[in-house]
Amino acid sequence: MGQDRETRQRWEPGPDEPPATDDWLALSDDDLLARIESLPDGHESDKHLMAVVCSSRHFFIRQEAAKRIVDGHLLKEHSNDRHIGQILVRAMNRHDDLAYLERLVRETRHLEVRKAAESQLERLRARFTPSTE
């Protein structure tokens, strides 16, 4: 736990004033969460959501943004982030994702990511393994 405290980034609250631009990071935490939650299915806001994921905002806000990313493969470079890695593995559901998930289970330092990856691997293996009945 001591190592976690040393490597944790301090989160930054959003500004008090509403943004004058289309910059989602200029929104307050409350407004940003409302915008993320209001996105319709099939939205085209992955660029804005990735900016939130890559930001220093609180992990909860970053996770909520990651959950709404349409193209889950955009999150792959964040697999070592224990908060985003959990969301990433839940979005993976194709046969070619098996190798990636297996590697993540072997290499991640974060128990939460490992457990989520193992669970998703189990689901995928059941889906892709022919039934012997």
Image (cartoon, grey):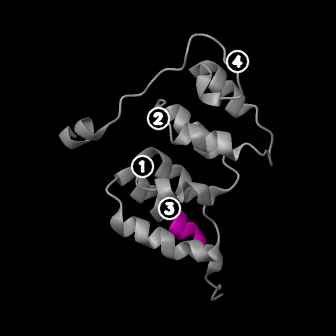
Q: In the visual, does 25 lie left or right of 104?
A: right
Q: Give the percent coordinates (x, y) of residue 115.
A: 42, 57
Looking at the rendered structure, the secondary structure element under dot 1 is loop
| Mark number displayed over residue 81 | 1
Magenta stretch, main secondary structure, is: helix
| Mark number displayed over residue 24 | none
Front tag of 3 and 1? 1
Q: CA distance from mark 3 to mark 1?
A: 18 Å
Q: Residue at x 63, y 79 (%)?
A: 128
Residue type at mark 2: give it.
Phe
Q: Earlier in the sequence, mark 3 or mark 1?
A: 1
- Give the magenta part as a residue range: 119-124
Query: What residue sits right under mark 2 in the picture?
Result: 59
Location of residue 66 with respect to 111 vertically, above or below:
above
- Residue in front for this viewpoint, 85 or 6: 6
- Residue in front for this viewpoint, 19 or 36: 19
Quarter holding the C terminus is bottom right
For label 4, the crowd category at 10 Å Cα-Cα, with few meaning under 14, some 14 to 19 and many 20 or more, is few
Number of numbered discs: 4
Residue type at mark 4: give it.
Ala
Query: What residue sits right under mark 3 in the picture?
Result: 119
The answer to whether one can see residue 64 in this image is: yes
Q: Earlier in the sequence, mark 2 or mark 4?
A: 4
Disc 3 and disc 1 in contact, CB within 8 angstroms: no
Q: CA distance from mark 2 to mark 1?
A: 10 Å
Residue type at mark 1: give it.
Asp
Q: Is residue 100 magenta?
A: no
Looking at the rendered structure, the secondary structure element under dot 2 is helix
Q: Residue furthest left?
A: 2
Query: What residue sits right under mark 4 in the picture?
Result: 20
